[in-house]
Image (cartoon, rainbow, N blue to C red):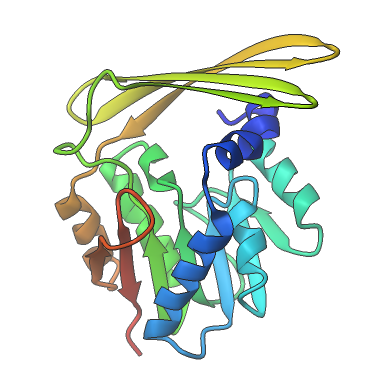
């Protein structure tokens, strides 16, 4: 999942869709410093291609990333050669320092395979917070807000060529959704087709909040944000 083909066009697709990583990073930095004015170190968990992390590096004195996908990891490390980006699973990672802020954005927690995995991931993040540190997690759709059979399409046309992206979601069961993704990438050298099938979990708001409680970092869902689904924000006591 998120192999080299998809990772290679990921930033182009989302930039064309209007995703403003810099504005989102500024919003999150403001949230973090609203709880911890002196926050200066940040870890971005499931950092993907490093687009948010690059923007965070302009706002925090020290940043690091963590990513499991080899394709995404390669893009992020090439983009940010001066930043430590760890190859690790969010459920089990163990780094040798704490952070004033930890983020997990773009609904990455939706890719966790079970409720136990969600609890483990939130627990690992909370464990890496310094006292007074702030944890910010962007969820995926909850069961009550998910729309089954949603189809989307996008065409990017530039001087170098074009990319077409098609996606469809379908309910697998009460817990999981399947998302089919197809890409056509056309350049002067030819046209390539690649596809992925993603399995994404539908965790409820109560389950998200319970995971933070279990980690000893009670959270609040902040809905008035630039993200569709809001942000869970928690502060580590002490």
Q: Residue at x 46, y 89 (%)?
A: 37
Q: Is residue 224 above or below residue 33?
A: above
Across and down, in percent, residue 149 comes to 27, 18
**Residue 179, horizontal then vertical, whole percent:** 39, 22
Q: Quadrant of residue 222?
A: bottom left
| Whole-percent x, y for residue 79 in the image | 76, 51
Residue 134 in view, yes or no: yes
Residue at 66% in and 69% down: 57
Q: Which percent across, then down, holds residue 154?
A: 51, 24
Is residue 90 found left or right of 204 in the rendered image?
right
The reply, left or right, for residue 9 in relation to residue 189 is left
Q: Quadrant of the N terminus?
A: top right
**Eyeballing the image, is 155 above or below 49?**
above
**Which residue occupies 47% across, 63% down?**
103
* On-image quarter of the C terminus: bottom left
Quadrant of the rendered structure where residue 195 is? Answer: top right
Q: Is residue 128 visible?
A: no
Q: In the drawing, does residue 206 fall left or right of residue 177?
A: left
Q: From the viewer's side, name the closer residue of 75 and 55.
A: 55
Task: Give the residue at x 64% y 70%.
Answer: 63
Query: Which residue reaches farthest right?
Result: 189
Q: Which residue occupies the foreground of this view, 152 or 173?
A: 152
Q: How many marks?
A: 0
């Amino acid at each position: 999942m998120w192999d080299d083909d998809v990772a290679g066009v990921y930033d182009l697709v989302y930039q064309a869709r209007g995703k403003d990583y810099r504005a989102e990073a500024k919003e999150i930095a403001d949230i973090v410093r609203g709880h911890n004015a002196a926050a200066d170190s940040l870890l971005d968990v499931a950092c993907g291609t490093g687009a948010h992390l690059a923007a965070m590096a302009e706002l925090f004195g020290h940043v690091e990333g963590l990513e499991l996908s080899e394709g995404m990891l390669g893009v992020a490390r090439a983009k940010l050669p001066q930043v430590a980006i760890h190859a690790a699973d969010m459920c089990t990672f163990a780094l040798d320092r704490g952070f004033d802020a930890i983020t997990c954005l773009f609904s990455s927690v939706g890719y966790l395979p079970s409720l136990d995995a969600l609890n483990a991931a939130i627990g690992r993040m909370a464990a890496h917070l310094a006292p007074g540190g702030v944890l910010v997690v962007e969820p995926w759709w909850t069961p009550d807000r998910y729309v089954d059979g949603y189809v989307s399409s996008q065409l990017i046309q530039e001087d170098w060529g074009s990319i077409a992206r098609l996606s469809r979601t379908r309910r697998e069961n009460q817990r999981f959704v399947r998302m089919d993704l197809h890409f056509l990438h056309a350049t002067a050298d030819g046209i390539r087709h690649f596809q992925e099938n993603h399995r994404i979990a539908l965790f409820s708001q109560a389950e998200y909040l319970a995971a933070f409680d279990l980690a000893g970092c009670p959270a609040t869902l902040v809905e008035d944000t630039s993200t569709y689904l809001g942000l869970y924000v928690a502060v580590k006591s002490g």
